[in-house]
Amino acid sequence: MGKESEAMKRLKLAALGILVLAACAPTTTAPPPSPGPGVGAQRPATPPAARSLDRALRETMAARLAAFTLAVQEYLRQKTGNARLSLEVEDAWLDLVSQGGRSQRFVTRSFNGEEVVVTAVSEHEADRIAIRVYDPDTGRLIHRGDASEAFDLVLAEVRGRMALEVEVSRCRRQDGCAVALGVAKVNGASLTQGRGAPISVPLERDFLPPDFWR
Amino acid sequence: MGARGGLWAAVWLMGLALGMGQTLPSPGAIWAGYGDIYLERGEVETALHLYQRALELDPDLQEAAAGEAAALALLERREEALSKLDAYLERHPDSPLVLHVRGQVRFLQGWVSGAYRDLKRAYELNPAEPLYALAYARAAVVVGAWGEGRAVLSTLLEEGVPKEIQDQAVSLLYLLLYLSRSQALFNERGSGDEAGSLVHGPGTVCPLHPGRNLSGPDWT
């Protein structure tokens, strides 16, 4: 009964879901991650967005996050020449954020010095977003990404938990940008070289497939 | 940018030294991984969409096949789930994960004997997985294979099994005890010797797990 494999984690989800249905209980939904202590303190709250993420948009953004993560994995493999490198999905959110607003997320999973990649991607290519990383205990900002693209990527060696934000500096739609945020563990390679602080990963503009934004 | 360049150069060289010639994991794994996240959140339709995209990339990815079927079952599309599971198992008859999920869906459909066969086979293929053992034991109890159920449940009371699994195993053991004793009384065969040793009073030690006292707080 050793260490749980990834397949077993998936199995648990599938099986528990079915069992819940079998028991005629309401479908359990994990509560949304709450910001950690200090996160969001002394900063303006995210303005409420006028529209909600409907099913189609949720599926689009979830698919975009997955495609982005896959592209990042391929990019990192090419950059490192390491075919063993793989990204293991740990957490993800979809949100709607108004221009100038932020989506605050607290990663509930705890890490033990593993390297993680935080990926964020927005709804439209013209949007501009950046990932911000906070100390979950003090709320201190420890990394602020560069909002020059409709995506951002941060690499960090994490001990304990993470507090994250996606900051939206430009939104094509006036009523808000749909943004997706993902956290994936880096397996099979060490990219941070023992550096403690999070770092932005420089991406060449053409690393995304040509039809990515369509 | 200079520091970044140096970092990437170091990473590149290290990667060349360590990573060449390795097998690439399936690209669908990332899609299926996100599917798991959304299924866990209860966003079943989004999860289904992600699993289906994963299967487009890798039709043989068992995690995606199992996740897709689980999502379909949760969306009350059980016949479709079973159809897809059957098709997958025709290609991969020894996938314990997919057998396990088909067993669960068959259970929901009321096909208990079919569920029992699938769950038993999944357990036989991977007896080290506690969830397979628990599902198999549950099916064994339902079909009346109490000896099998008890034997499997006893393995779940060993060290190293997650507490949530152990708690469910203990509940099932009590159900099994109740059923077997009721049957014994009904048949006027005495007090149910097979299960009698597990019926506890104050201070009774569990014979399946001697380190735990049945009257302790963990068992209440």
Image (tube, helix red, strand yellow):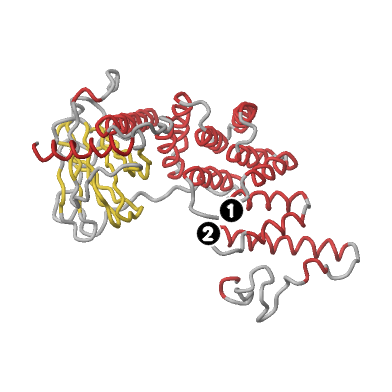
Residue A5 visible (yes or no): yes
**Residue B171 pos. (x, y %):** 64, 62
The residue sitting at the left extreme is B2
> Residue B63 placed where, x, y %?
51, 36
Where does the image place residue A207, in percent across and percent down from the top left?
24, 25
- What's the residue type where badge 1 is placed? Pro
Earlier along the polypeptide chain: callout 1 or callout 2? 1
Q: What residue type is labelled 2?
A: Pro
Instruction: Name the chain letter of the residue that bears numbered label 1.
Output: B
Q: How crowded is mark 2: few (under 14 residues within 10 Å), some or many (20 or more)?
A: some
- Read off the chain for label 2: B
In the picture, the disc for residue B92 is: none
Q: Is residue B107 left or right of residue A52?
A: right
- Whether residue B82 is situated above or below residue B148 in the rendered picture: above
In this picture, residue B116 sits left or right of residue A67: right
Q: Name the residue under label 1.
A: B130
Residue B176 relative to residue A150: left or right: right
Count of residue discs: 2
Residue underneath mark 2:
B162
- Crowding around mark 1 (Cα neighbors within 10 Å: few <14, some 14 to 19, many 20+) is many
Image quarter hosting the C terminus of chain A: top left
